[in-house]
Image (tube, rainbow, N blue to C red):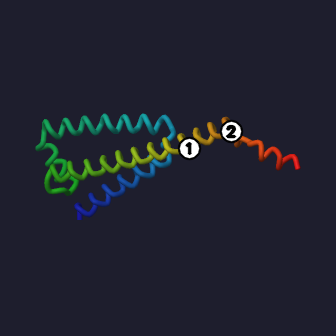
Amino acid sequence: MTIILFQILLLLATFMLVVYFLSRRRKARAKAGVKLGFVLFIVAAVWAVLRPDDLTVLANFVGVDRGTDLLLYVVVVAFLFTTLSTWIRFREQELRYARLARAVALQTVVLPAVSGADEDRAAR
């Protein structure tokens, strides 16, 4: 029962990260939240390395058998978050490049050269 609850919590956390990240991507608070989450992740990683037995106790508390399994689940969620973040950033960058290319193209319109034969036809 607790394993299923923990799996639901992990899936819910992943879904919440996706929704949060997609809805608040351009806001400064979202960027600060990402930095804060990263710092917390680093602190938790150092703690897990220095005190692995505590990680096993925490894993047992949430219904996972081993601390290494819990760590794997957390790393998978972090990887998904990082992948989503990179994908969104690249998509936004491509849109900026497309807008810039359109603006430059509209500002530097080059009319086709008119040859002498074309001028004769246009005069008729």
Tell me residue 117's x, y (percent). 77, 46
Q: Which residue is mark 1?
A: 98
Above or below 54: residue 62: below
Q: Can you say whether 9 is above or below 104 in the image?
A: below
Given the image, on which type of amino acid does mark 2 rest? Val
Q: 107 or 74: which is nearer to us?
A: 107
Residue 89 x, y percent position in the rendering: 44, 43
Viewer-nearest residue: 123 or 95: 123
Q: Which residue is mark 2?
A: 109
Indicate which disc residue 40 carries: none
- The crowding category of the residue bearing disc 2, from other C-alpha atoms within 10 Å (few below 14, some 14 to 19, many at least 20), is few
Residue 119 in picture, x, y percent from top left: 81, 44
* Amino acid type of the residue that numbered disc 1 sits on in the rendered structure: Ala
Q: CA distance from mark 1 to mark 2?
A: 17 Å
Which type of secondary structure does the marked residue at label 2 adopt?
loop
Residue 55 occupies which quadrant of the picture? top left
Which residue is at a point 28% across and 60% down the rendered structure image?
7
Residue at 25% in and 35% down: 43
Q: Quadrant of residue 8?
A: bottom left
Q: Residue at x 17, y 53 (%)?
A: 69
